[in-house]
Amino acid sequence: MAAYFLEAGLLLVLAPWTDRFWDQNSFLVTSPSLRDLFNNSFVRGAVSGIGVLTVFAGLAEIAAMFAARRTAEPGDHASI
């Protein structure tokens, strides 16, 4: 699950600022009002902000996994 959070977060951080991925969208080609909204820098920043939060959630999950592994007893393999 942590890998998913990291991958999705990085995609959300980078995608709004890449013209090929963000501007050449089939939904935006058909609707000029959506195109104007999604080309707004505030919307792009909001999507990137959600991506940063998602990356932090992935890193927190990895940290929790390592903490649980560190607190497990040496003979206990159930938590791994």
Image (tube, rainbow, N blue to C red):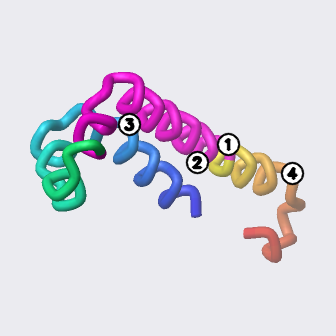
Q: Callout 3 environment at 10 Å: few (<14), some (14 to 19), or many (20+)?
A: many
User: Marks 3/1: CA distance?
Assistant: 17 Å
Camera-near label (3 vs 4) is 3
Is the Cβ of the residue at disc 2 closer than 8 Å to that at disc 3? no
Q: Considering depth in this image, is 30 or 11 the residue closer to the camera? A: 30
User: Marks 2/1: CA distance?
Assistant: 5 Å
Q: Secondary structure at mark 2?
A: helix
Quadrant showing the C terminus: bottom right
Rendered view: 24 above or below 73: above
Amino acid carrying mark 4 in the image: Thr
Q: Callout 1 environment at 10 Å: few (<14), some (14 to 19), or many (20+)?
A: few
Question: Which residue is rendered at x = 36% and y = 31% of the image?
Answer: 44
Q: Which residue is mark 1?
A: 60
- The disc at residue 71 is 4
Question: Which residue is rendered at x = 74% and y = 48% of the image?
Answer: 64
Direction top: furthest residue? 41
Question: Which residue is rendered at x = 10% and y = 44% of the image?
Answer: 20
Task: Find the magenta span and give its range.
Answer: 34-60
Question: Which mark sits nearer the N-terminus, 3 or 1?
Answer: 3
Camera-near label (4 vs 1) is 1
Is the Cβ of the residue at disc 2 closer than 8 Å to that at disc 1? yes
Q: Which residue is mark 3?
A: 13
Q: Main secondary structure of the magenta part?
A: helix
Is the Cβ of the residue at disc 3 closer than 8 Å to that at disc 1? no
Quadrant showing the N terminus: bottom right
Q: Secondary structure at mark 3?
A: helix
Q: Considering depth in this image, is 5 or 20 the residue closer to the camera? A: 20
Rendered view: 29 above or below 39: below
